[in-house]
Each structure stands twice: as structure tokens, then as C-alpha cells.
Image: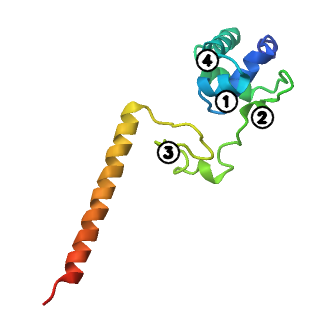
Amino acid sequence: MDDSRFSSLTPREIECLKGVAQHKRTKDIASDLDLSPKTVDAYIANAVRKLGFSDRDSAVRALMSSSAMIGGFSSSAISGVENEGSTASSSWLGRLPLPFPTRERPTNDLNYPGTIVAIVVAASLMVAAMSLYILAISIFTEHP
């Protein structure tokens, strides 16, 4: 990719893409930069257009893989996260979408249907655990 495309980005566009690279939601990026979410979306859309991509994730991947220095950020600084495979959270378990925030992923990774499935699975596990508990109580309290 031509590094001159990256040099056409404004500092705000780079800051917004950095937030996307850190897996932040638009609302969180806006809060961090003291902007409105619509303004953040506009900055991201402009950056995506300038870089010649159709979506924000492709633009961020290209920016992270570029060796260009942009606005004082190298591609590794833009990511804000460690490379995959270098942390314990990059195991298969760490990559599962979760219905609750964690320290490594402060935002909910699931969409609406995924959240419903997670709730149903959690409820099923609780029912199974309670059933086993009641069974164990009944076995140990029976008198011959």
C-alpha cells in the first residue's frame, strides 16, 4: 500500500482509527476524545475513504501493517494491543466472544442473538447444577 495515503490522514482521523484498533466502540472513542459519536464516525468514514477501503476494519488492518510513521504513531503504537499469540488471552478461550466485559476487552463482544444464546446457556448450566445439588441432597438424606 502506498504510504502517501497514510500521510493524508489528519491527527483526529488517526486518533479515531487508533480507537477502532483498540476495539473501542464509537461511543467510547468519542468520550475519550471529547467529541460526539457522529463526529467520530465522520472522522473514521473520511479516513476509510482516503485510504481507499470500504470498511473501518480493513483500514485499521492496513494502517497497523504499514511501516509508515503517521502523526507520531508507528503501526505498532496505533494498535494499542499486543500481537496475537503473545498473550494468554490469545488462546482459543481468550478469543471467544463474551456477554460481559473483561480487563482485556472492556466492551461486550456479542450481538443481540449471541447475548440471548449466552443467557440460555448460563441458565441451563445453573439448572443442571441445581438438579445435581438436589439429587445429591436426596441421596445423602435417604435412610435405609
Q: At which x and y percent is residue 3?
A: 80, 17
SS type, badge 3: loop
Q: At which x and y percent is residue 23?
A: 62, 32
Q: Earlier in the sequence, mark 1 or mark 3?
A: 1
Q: Is residue 97 above or below residue 37?
A: below
Q: At which x and y percent is residue 28?
A: 63, 28
Q: Which residue is mark 2?
A: 76
User: Is the residue marked by circle 3 packed among few (<14), some (14-19), or many (20+) residues within 10 Å?
Assistant: few
SS type, badge 4: helix
Q: Is residue 15 above or below residue 138?
A: above
Q: Which residue is mark 4?
A: 37
The kind of residue on which mark 3 rests is Leu
The label shown at residue 21 is: 1
Q: Are marks 3 and 2 in contact (CB under 8 Å)?
A: no
Outermost residue toward the left? 144
Disc 3/disc 2 C-alpha distance (Å): 24 Å
Disc 2/disc 1 C-alpha distance (Å): 10 Å
Residue shown at 70%/27% (left/top)?
32
Disc 2/disc 4 C-alpha distance (Å): 25 Å
Q: Which residue is mark 3?
A: 96
Disc 4/disc 1 C-alpha distance (Å): 16 Å
Q: Quadrant of the N terminus?
A: top right
The kind of residue on which mark 1 rests is Ala
Q: Quadrant of the C terminus?
A: bottom left
Disc 3/disc 4 C-alpha distance (Å): 27 Å
The kind of residue on which mark 4 rests is Pro
Is residue 112 or residue 70 the one in the foreground? Answer: 112
Q: At which x and y percent is residue 138?
A: 20, 76
Mark nearer the viewer, 2 or 1: 1
Residue shown at 23%/82% (left/top)?
140
User: Is the residue marked by circle 4 packed among few (<14), some (14-19), or many (20+) residues within 10 Å?
Assistant: some
Is residue 115 or residue 55 the one in the foreground? Answer: 115
